[in-house]
Image: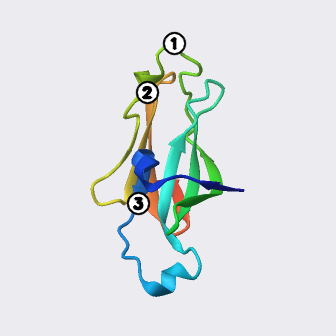
Amino acid sequence: MRLHVAPSLLLVASLFPFSPSASQAQAPSSTGSVYIMTNRAEGNSVLVYKRASDGSLTFSKEVSTHGLGPGLTLDPLQSQGSLSLSNDGKLLLAVNAASGTLTAFVVNSTGISFGS
């Protein structure tokens, strides 16, 4: 599945810097990842998408946080900031509001995995 998103809408994205070149105009190449938290009450998870240089997104995988999200709410901003990438891009932190836990993922070349 491919989804096209304009680059200006990627505020939820964690993108690694890239410099477009003439060779990249030929075929979209990967320029980073986008992480989206589901906030499902029955089991929270992070959806991982790969971002191509043309702005399109390709679903990569879903990773459980082993916690619970708040589910549907009248205030969709209550979970604002609950998914955060560290300044060095090596850790992704997910708040599981309903279970009162924090999940730390290590960011690597294949996506994310649980921190140790």
Name the residue rendered at 55%, 67% in the picture: 110
3D distance between C-alphas at marks 3 and 1 = 30 Å
Q: Could one spot residue 29 in this view of the protein?
A: yes
Helix, strand or loop for disc 3: strand
Q: Earlier in the sequence, mark 3 or mark 2?
A: 3
Task: Estimate how packed mark 2 is, as few (under 14), some (14 to 19) or many (20 or more) residues with alpha carbons within 10 Å.
Answer: some
**Residue 57 picture location, percent across and down:** 59, 58
Helix, strand or loop for disc 2: helix
> Which residue has dot 3 on it?
15
Q: Residue 90: which disc? A: none
The mark lying in front, picked from 3 and 2, is: 3
Task: Estimate how packed mark 3 is, as few (under 14), some (14 to 19) or many (20 or more) residues with alpha carbons within 10 Å.
Answer: some
**Residue 22 picture location, percent across and down:** 45, 85
Q: Could one spot residue 116 in this view of the protein?
A: no
In the rendered view, tell whether residue 39 sits above or below residue 62.
above
> Which residue has dot 2 on it?
79
In the rendered view, tell whether residue 42 sits above or below residue 8.
above
Viewer-proximal residue among 116 and 70: 70
3D distance between C-alphas at marks 1 and 2 = 11 Å
> Which residue has dot 1 on it?
74
Viewer-proximal residue among 102 and 21: 21
Report the side of 50 relative to 92 (left or right).
Answer: right
Report the side of 116 relative to 42 (left or right).
Answer: left
